[in-house]
Amino acid sequence: MEKGKLHPLMLAGTGSDVGKSIIAAAFCRIFRQDGYHPAPFKAQNMALNSYATPEGLEIGRAQAVQAEAAGIACHTDMNPLLLKPQSDHTSQVVLNGKPLGNKSAYDYWKNNSQFSILNSQLRKEVCDAFDRLSARYNPIVMEGAGSISEINLRDTDLVNLPMARHAKADVILVGDIDRGGVFASVYGSIALQNPEDRKLIKGIIINKFRGDMRLFDKGKQMLEEICGIPVLGVIPYYTDIHIEEEDSVALAQKSFEMRQGKVNVAVVMLRHLSNYTDFDALEQDPRIHLFYTNNTDDISKADIIILPGTKSTLHDLYELRRNGCAQAIIRAHRDGATVLGICGGYQMMGVEVCDPDHVEGDIERLPGLGLLPITTTIGGEKVTRQIEAQLTSHLSPLTSHFLNGYEIHMGETLPFGDAKESPLLQLSDGRADGYFVDNQCMGTYIHGILDNAPFVDFLLQPFADKLAKTDKSFDYQAFKEEQYDRLAEHVRKHVDMEQIYKILTDD
């Protein structure tokens, strides 16, 4: 039986990294479990971790994860505006999945007539995207950005309370008790709103609580008294549920050291590292210990070295040469380590990387690591598409398996000089991808390739002596489904869903 219409729900925050994205994913799964047909929405996102939709367009990774939790395909209407930082001061602006160009933070936000026109256009685009989504799904689980109390940005805000007003959404304010100051941040966030926006905030969720929940009973009562709205839940901190996160803050929780007894996989820590969710599957694989490093000694000891994607290939390649990591990777490979490059990392493994049109910046050319006989020219149209592929026939018995992933890159990579083509993958549309020297030296443009168990098994073949006979392939897709269900159970247990449903249906 079709469920009745619910109001849109916005998870807004007292600040960045309070857990809005994860709680939004939890509600997407909860509503799906309860028989609704939910979809996520975030008007404007700033992240280097992005994803390609089935239509070959680009959105923030968090909304792709939330869509997966909701059991639906992701779409650009779920994140119509994406800002991808390229430096400390500039970002690439992606609108409805396609890049508009680069803007400095000052140019993007400054209050002049040209900006006002741009801001009005963007506001119309994000509102139109919400309206299209709302016509197809019920309810819309909206996510705010950063803090709702940045009153200096109120006139230009596209994503928080102004978006909630357009959507006629019920807002739940999320506060992070783990960082301290939760009373001030929650009360202050509400008090700083104008009367119209304050009425939209229907409840509070306290996130990341540690310790005995009973100790906060009085605190919950006091918050309700001073804020005048209910505390709808106090969600305990957890360490045993694993959901992909797009915020670079999450990198601080990653491992940065070797471990004995497993295949050690070193992801080279780049300044402009992007799409680090490429490695979430390996982090959960019991055969593997994955860590991030730019320490040359650690690189020399790793079994597998992965050069990840980057938003600035030439600048990160320059830094690898400056800090000695490039030489360490080359030496480690010579001594028996496997080297895999993904996207920008694949480009770096070649003979050279060229940027004649200064797409990335001032550097026109740099020599690569020379591990693959390829050359890359940065420029042209950005490629964004989902793919299905197989390992090329000469590589492995695993070629019968289909692999899934997605491309997000700019640039063309070709064999260097008289080198012959030796692709790693054969795509279902007839194209080839990547380059393969042997099973310990290869590169690909495909993000998400490590989510495929057959490819991970192929990558681990040279290290069979380190793997116990009982170790089996790791099914990452089944693992993710289990994690969404566990997250939903955790949040459902600690929030008042009956009261939330009442809020979402009251006139």
Image (spheres, helix red, strand yellow):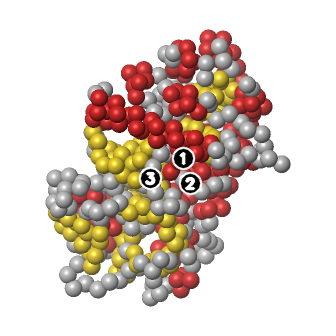
Q: Nearer the viewer, mark 3 or mark 2?
A: 3
Please indicate whether residue 401 sits to the left or right of residue 152 in the image: right
Q: Is residue 118 above or below residue 96?
A: above
On residue 97, which mark appears?
Answer: 3
The part of the image, by quadrant, that contains residue 74 is bottom right
Three-letter residue code for mark 1: Met
Numbered-mark total = 3
What secondary structure is marked by label 2? loop
Q: Which label's residue is closer to the chain start, 1 or 3?
A: 1
What secondary structure is marked by label 1? helix
Q: Judge the density around disc 2: few (<14), some (14-19), many (≥20) Cα neighbours within 10 Å.
A: many
Q: Are marks 1 and 3 in contact (CB under 8 Å)?
A: no
Q: Is residue 280 above or below residue 177?
A: below
Q: Is residue 292 above or below residue 365?
A: above
At 55% from the left and 37% from the top, the residue drawn is 143
On residue 256, which mark appears?
Answer: none
Three-letter residue code for mark 2: Cys
**What whole-number distance in Å separates the C-alpha atoms at marks 3 and 2?**
11 Å
Which sits in the foreground, 313 or 301?
Answer: 313
What secondary structure is marked by label 3? loop
Place of residue 200 in the rendered image (x, y in percent of width and height, measured from the top left):
60, 23
